[in-house]
Image: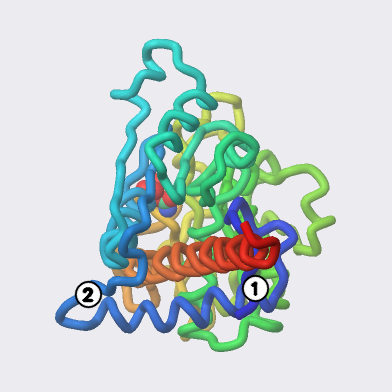
Amino acid sequence: MNWTRKHLLGLEGIERDEIITILDTTSRFREILDRPVKKVPTLRGITIANLFFEPSTRTRMSFELAEKRLSADVLNFSASTSSLKKGETLRDTARNIEAMKVDMVVMRHPSPGAPHFLTNHIDGSIINAGDGSHEHPTQALLDLFTMREHAGDLKGKRVTIVGDILHSRVARSDIWGLKALGADVTLCGPSTFMPTEVEKLGVTVTHDIRDATGDADIVNILRIQRERQNGGFLPSLREYSALFGINAARLREMKPDVLIMHPGPINRGVEIAPDVADGDRSVILEQVTNGVAVRMAMLYLLSMVRASKRVEEADILAEVGA
Ligand code: CP
């Protein structure tokens, strides 16, 4: 097993072998989801807190389901109904949750680096479930798993990411993961949506959708984040859709076996046409199913690291006769 990290904070700096370990472990958990009884005792006795400071449908439900499928005890925390409203700090909230003997924390937060900050204040393993525009590692891992299921080894595969790269934590994590696996990554979108010097990450940038998708094996379409469009990034959604939206006519110009992906939530008729989202090249709902298995795998791997640390500590205590 090639996984020794205590936390999953992002995919920046991750090694190919680590990703392969996660994806291979995911395959084992994916099989459980097709059984009549979809529950195993792997995390019995482990308590996991889901701290969501931002809205979420897929990630939150997917983590909760993964935890329950593994028989963990689950605590759900929502910022809108918590004592944060009374002025409590993130650090104090987290330390109080830890005082309840929580083993792992899954956290979504609007501020980049919030999960990293938490690692300095609590002892449990932390999983980043999306921090601002920074990273969303489990989304990228489920993307990679879905890509590998269909396209095999991703080395040399052409993957195009279309849309608002600047604001996208999914794009950032996808890029790190895809580069670690040797894929050729192209980014496409308006120049206002491209981070400065993004080419330094080893990706190709184009503003022409036909160039970007004509020979792509996989096209991953990002959501236009309407909540972040008040900074003059886009003239209009209509113009974006005309220039970069993926519709049936554009799909016909792509490879016949191209894979169409989207992390959700979808803006139908903006970045993707309904008939493409629901069409036979789309694996969008498969991504959602695979997300549960990826999260089960991640929780399992992190629990194994915690368990081996406890064994090491017990060995040391035994050696010194404590
Ligand atoms: N893909 C994703 O992160 O979706 P949610 O915001 O619904 O969790």
- Of residue 90 and residue 286, the one placed in the foreground of this image is 90
Residue sticking out furthest to the bottom: 152
Ligand 1: does it lie within 8 Å of the C-beta at label 2? no
- Expressed as whole percent of the image width and height from the top left, the position of residue 141 reads 53, 66
**The quadrant where residue 274 appears:** bottom left
Residue 265 in sight here: no
The kind of residue on which mark 2 rests is Lys
The number of discs equals 2
Is residue 99 shown left or right of residue 72?
right
Count neighbours of disc 2 (C-alpha within 10 A) and say few if under 14, some if 14 to 19, many if 20 or more: some
- Expressed as whole percent of the image width and height from the top left, the position of residue 19 reads 61, 73
**In which quadrant of the rendered image does the C terminus lie?**
bottom right
- Where disc 1 sits, the SS reads helix
Is residue 310 shown left or right of residue 73?
right
Residue 198 in sight here: yes
Note whether 292 is above or below 155 in the view shown: above
At x 59%, y 70%, the residue is 213
**The quadrant where residue 207 appears:** bottom right
Sequence-wise, the earlier of marks 2 and 1 is 1
The kind of residue on which mark 1 rests is Glu
Residue sticking out furthest to the front: 321
Residue sticking out furthest to the left: 36
- Where disc 2 sits, the SS reads loop
At x 56%, y 67%, the residue is 311
Residue at which label 2 appears: 38
Note whether 196 is above or below 268 in the view shown: above
- Expressed as whole percent of the image width and height from the top left, the position of residue 173 reads 61, 57
Count neighbours of disc 1 (C-alpha within 10 A) and say few if under 14, some if 14 to 19, many if 20 or more: some
What numbered label is drawn on residue 18?
A: 1
- Of residue 230 and residue 321, the one placed in the foreground of this image is 321
**In which quadrant of the rendered image does the N terminus lie?**
bottom right
